[in-house]
Amino acid sequence: MSKPDVLAVAKLHPFYKQALESLFTVHDRTHETDPAAFASLAPRILGVAGTGEASVPRSLLAQLPNAKVVSVFGVGYDGVDVPAAIEHGIPVTHTPEVLTDDVADLAMGLVLSIGRAIPQADQFVRAGRWPSGPMALGRKVSGARIGIVGLGRIGKAIAHRASAFGMSIAYTARSKKPDLNFTFYPSATELAAHVDFLVAITPGGAGTKHLINAEVLKALGSSGFLINVARGSVVDEAALLEALQNGTIAGAGIDVFANEPHVPEAFWKLNNVVLTPHMASATAQTRQAMADLAFANMQAGIAGQPLRTPVPECMAMTSHKG
Ligand code: NAP
Ligand code: 8YV
């Protein structure tokens, strides 16, 4: 008997792909590579597998009359048209919690990397420049002021780490958190004006597009650093580039970009940035945990069983197509 069919809408991590292949026939982006073949395949597709960066638009969902679940390998699902999925009776799942520690670790890694110029120091030694040194002084991280844009699961984990560094912690979010003893500012601009390191860790999508713009960067100021581990869309990349080139801000640690995997070459040339390739959850341990959870959601969705981790908008929903 042939295995049930699922559609991968992005290049899947091998841990997730191999798990899926144990039970399903995985069609790797057939909707893009062979639309004619996809027209006859589409009615057989029972599940859609994606990543945090993947696009699942209304037009694709409309072609999948028998799909029972969209299982995203990632906590962010801004590429999925969730209202359209709900209209089509297809619940969406994601992988919260299992990656929280890794993303918070990388955020702090970028704070330390750019504040203390660690990659620049490595280059300094490798280029044989130490004998004619010294390097410029870094920015003290312990005791500095950190501002977190988005105090959700990962934002709180960053705060936890920052408090161990004796940092003073402030944040902005859609709502104030009365149970937490951190300073709340109602806007990113007000927050930026009061901190040394501003860390973006919100979801992407229309609600946060260019939340960090030229005004916020100006408020952060010439001794401030921006860290972006959220989504490329959260930061106005052109404004950031200009702010880094002009010295409007001191520097940036950037894990996510507007047009991944393409990073504007102008960033490569700057000495006041640390650039990483969207790798905040990229450890073997966490990618395995994400794969296990995404696979469990796919299995449950296709079997019509309760989903492990539906996205909040789909909590009350089970597939209409059991
Ligand atoms: P979460 O628990 O849902 O937290 C999201 C936070 O963002 C909440 O505090 C929320 O505010 C805040 N927020 C939402 N819209 C906002 C807005 N317009 N202005 C200000 N704050 C806003 O999510 P999470 O698990 O922490 O994950 C957060 C995001 O991190 C993901 O969605 C993804 O984009 C990103 N991420 C990136 C990587 C990477 O590899 N770089 C890895 C994992 C996740 P309220 O608390 O008031 O609702
Ligand atoms: C992953 C992410 O890099 O969870 C997210 O939202 O952006 C990251 O953990 C991504 O989903 C895997 O491609």
Image (cartoon, grey):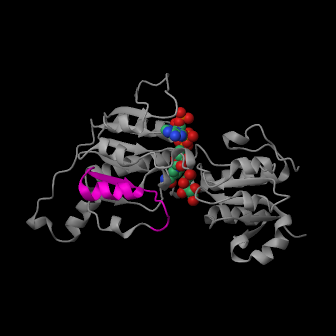
Quadrant in which the N terminus appears: bottom right
Which sits in the foreground, 1 or 86?
Answer: 86
Residue 256 inside the magenta-drawn segment: yes
Task: State yes or no: residue 261 in magenta.
Answer: yes
Q: Is residue 14 above or below residue 251?
A: below
- Residue pictured at 79% horizontal, 48% vertical: 87
Instruction: Identify the residue at image location x=42%, y=34%.
Output: 171
- Residue 54 point in image, percent of width and height: 62, 60
Question: Left or right of 73: which side holds 138?
Answer: left
From this viewpoint, which residue is outermost toward the top? Answer: 178
Query: What span is in magenta?
Result: 237-262
| Residue 176 % position (x, y) | 49, 27
User: Does the rendering let one see residue 144?
Assistant: yes
In the foreground, 166 or 81: 81
Q: Is residue 257 above or below residue 128?
A: above
Q: In the rendering, at what x and y percent does residue 89 appear?
A: 81, 48
Residue found farthest to the front? 215
Q: Residue furthest right?
A: 1
33 displayed left or right of 75? right
Q: Quadrant of ligand 2?
A: bottom right
Looking at the picture, tell me which residue is in the foreground, 254 or 25.
254
Left or right: residue 213 versus residue 100 is: left
Q: Nearer the viewer, residue 165 or 191?
A: 191
Rendered view: 6 above or below 235: below
User: Can see residue 99?
Assistant: no
